[in-house]
Amino acid sequence: MTGKSVGATVSTEERLAEVLAGVVDTEEVPLDSNFFTDLGADSLVMAKFCARVRKRDDLPTVSMKDIYQHSTIESLAAAFPDTATAPPRTDTPSGAASGVESGVESGASTGAGTQTLLAEVLAGVMRTERVPADGDFFTDLGADSLVMAQFCARVRKRDDLPTVSMKDIYQHSTIESLAAAFPDTATAPPRTDAPRGAAADVESGPQTGRTSGTGAWRYVLCGTAQLLTFVGFSCLGTLALLRGYMWIAAGSGTADVYLRAVAFGAVILLGLCALPVAAKWILIGRFTPRSIPVWSFAYLRFWWIKTLIRTSPARLFVGSPLYVLYLRALGAHIGKGVTVLTRFVPVCPDLITIGDRTVVRKDVLFSGYRAHDGRIETGTLTLGRDVTVSEQAVIDIGTSMGDGSQLGHASSLHSGQTVPPGEAWHGTPARPSSVDYRAVGPVECGTLRRGLYSLWRVMAIVLIYLPLTVAGVDLLLTLLPQLNAVVSAGPPVFTSLAFFLETLVASLVVFFGGLLVGLLTVNTVPRLLSPVNKRGRIYPLYGFHYGVQRAVTRMTNIRFFTTLFGDSSAIVHYLRSLGYDLGRVQQTGSNFGLLVRYDTPYLSRVGKGTMIADGLSVINTDYSSTSFRLSPATIGAKSFLGNNIVYPPRARTGDNCLLATKVMVPVEGPMREGVGLLGSPSFEIPRTVLRDSRLDHFGRGEELRRRLAAKNKHNALTAGLFLLTRWLHFFALALIAMVAVDLYHVFGAVVFALSGLLSLAFSVGYFALVEWASMGFRRLRPLYCSIYEPAFWAHERFWKLGAIHVYMQIFNGTPFKAMLWRLLGMRIGRRVFDDGCATAERTLVGIGDGCTLNAGTVIQCHSQEDGAFKSDHISIGANVTLGVGAFVHYGTTVGDHAQLGADSFLMKGEEVPAQARWSGNPATALVASDRATPERHQGETRESFTDS
């Protein structure tokens, strides 16, 4: 490098060599030895080396990209200026020094143009003397999205430069065009990262003292009350089921037993559906717009009602007129001819108004509340007449949609937004669009049709499903004498060896027999039913054709099977057996992840060489409030789809496309091919993902065949371990249940409360142990490797064996959720409120004190990009709020008291400053004009729902 003395270079080499020697545990390392081929280090070792270097003030910041580009100490030291004259470290900006980049002092930059300043910052990020102003960031300079995210973060720290987002980077991919897109720094608008004046409180208006109600004693009392609630309901529920079964079994003859089963099932179904309605009106009355401190008594009442509403069997009637009646009984203002297809039940129905003939499609989040800065905020949500809300949309409180308006898929309305009548909006946050999302017209669907369909749904449950369940239990007890003795009034039998052996046999028969029966059913029954509905034909809702389509969807989307076969070569054969058109498969061993959903497999096609990550939801059915139509959905060849993507049938994407995480797939415009798409609404980015050249040879020729065979063996063993761990868990729960029934005659109903608590505690502890065992009882470390390397296979095993997420949902909104995160290795602070956050790599996540995590929030520490896998840490500061449905990617840092808006996507490598408000997909800093008007209703109305 120019201007660097030989002595200074040697000094930097010696310091780097000293650090590396400590990492690899040797006395010294040769300066000219290759890290990988000569020293035998791997990506994990070198990531640790980079971390230690970053902690040294006398050494420059070194990244894994630097390691791969300069793979000896000698070349690595030569790539950086001497530490004595190096620019100040930018990991933590300090005072005026934050304006210095790449050796250019802040005073020298005064009066310099925006283009020059941006070039200096990028040169500092890329460890080079200069960058050409007309060089494309990706194709000419070789940068990737992570490098450019770091560039954006450094630009945001400079007061003499405008705020630059990743969307700006993709739209203006040279320094020259990027600088032209912004005014000169002399006239640049004020920086908005830090809040100013009244605009500081973005989404909830004036704060009312976030420490109110969050004292330790309220935290403990609330958790204790929630625990007692669970114990009480476990006791009452189990006792009711046991008494009911005994009453049914006492019947004389088959007809009498059947009638008793029907009567008992009807009473239980009606009672469980009516319970949340009665409890809501007694404990709450009507929900009103207001703010509730978490952990307060008012919050406890809110949590009781939320839990009852979301665990009610009324969820079985989603997509039917009965579900609309249930919401009306809870207080929702819903007009005639409304169809609600989302499985996410609104919690504050009094605040929700839906006009006539409106349709709310699959996976829409519109709860009527949100958590913000340690408080629960409830607010109104109004949908006019003839409104269409498309799949996977998020509607925040304080929003409205006029008559005849539309909201696109993967879009969101933020607090304060109003869609005018007749307009279509899309994006996050939503903005006007010219797209018509009403893909199917209305048909005649009268009251009689709705009534008959509702009657059939109830009769199917009461007359068929519940009696069959009772018959199954009765058959099991008849075949196993020791288990049959359990329900008699005789002495306890659980101490006998025969009891354990017969429970073991019963669990084997039920678990593996049910597995085989399930596989046979999903591969035959849907094939027999599917020809009933023809593609392209419009059918009315709530009839025979609609019932068939709903049945096909349920039977072909069993999560247990996709988890069993996903992330392996077996998933291709499973999906093809269901009816998916996969063409000529190019096997990668990871063609599909663990979570893949479709409306129907028979109209879903995936091209050759395409890889799909987790969370894909393919939409094959277009809905209006009165009709539906099946349409084919085709994913092009040689493409890659990231996480949490909803893929509509009208998608305008062809071959060789990269669809980024949470992207809104376009349904208008030209067919996209050979490009990448990012954001909502989506915009084009380079298709090619920059990967280190050392990964390329894994995916070619003989090396690919050899490693794929090894991966298949590893995945097969993982599938076997998956079945073994699930069966052992099933056996243990069956044993606990049978012992409880056996001791009921001795200790009474209290034994059921204890057994329910024991079952939950065992499940959590068991799967926590399984998860730690799958990690080798060590914390995960950042990875950068090929999907054909054993390190990735081990990570796949970690994903598949973990099942604790199912039980984590029980603890949403309780102090126990944070305790379980700690048990699983997450570094999490005190009194964190978690209303439904999901994260896989818990040991890579750090969350500060007093954070608020909303329902549907995802914190994901990894990504798979074609054949490369990457994972890294995520650091979230204290008192941070992550909005409903927000997604935080790996390698990110969120400062204290920052906020991330609803449905936002924080891209990898981003750094959100303290106190900042970010929103959008991809997320960017909000300016004052973008921030929602403070909601006047917060804390005004108390009525019957007041704090204690």
Image (spheres, rainbow, N blue to C red):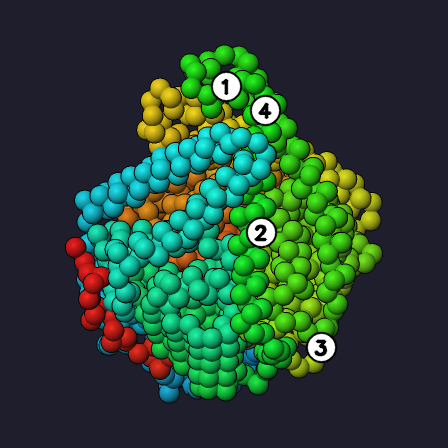
The residue lying toward the viewer, choosing from 352 and 61, is 352
Residue matched to label 1: 485
Q: SS for tag 2?
A: helix
Query: Compared to 136, does 546 lie above or below?
Result: above
| Residue assigned mark 3 | 671
Badge 4 crowding class, 10 Å Cα cut-off, few under 14, some 14 to 19, many 20 or more, is few
Q: Is residue 239 above or below residue 138?
A: above
Looking at the image, the residue that sits furthest to the left is 948
At 43% from the left and 46% from the top, the residue drawn is 267
- Between disc 3 and disc 1, the foreground one is 1
Whether 83 is drawn above or below 802: the answer is below
Q: Residue 460 carries which label?
A: 2
Q: How far apart are marks 2 and 4 (CA)?
A: 26 Å
Callout 4 secondary element: helix
Q: In which quarter of the image is residue 666?
A: bottom right
**Amino acid on which disc 1 is placed:** Ala
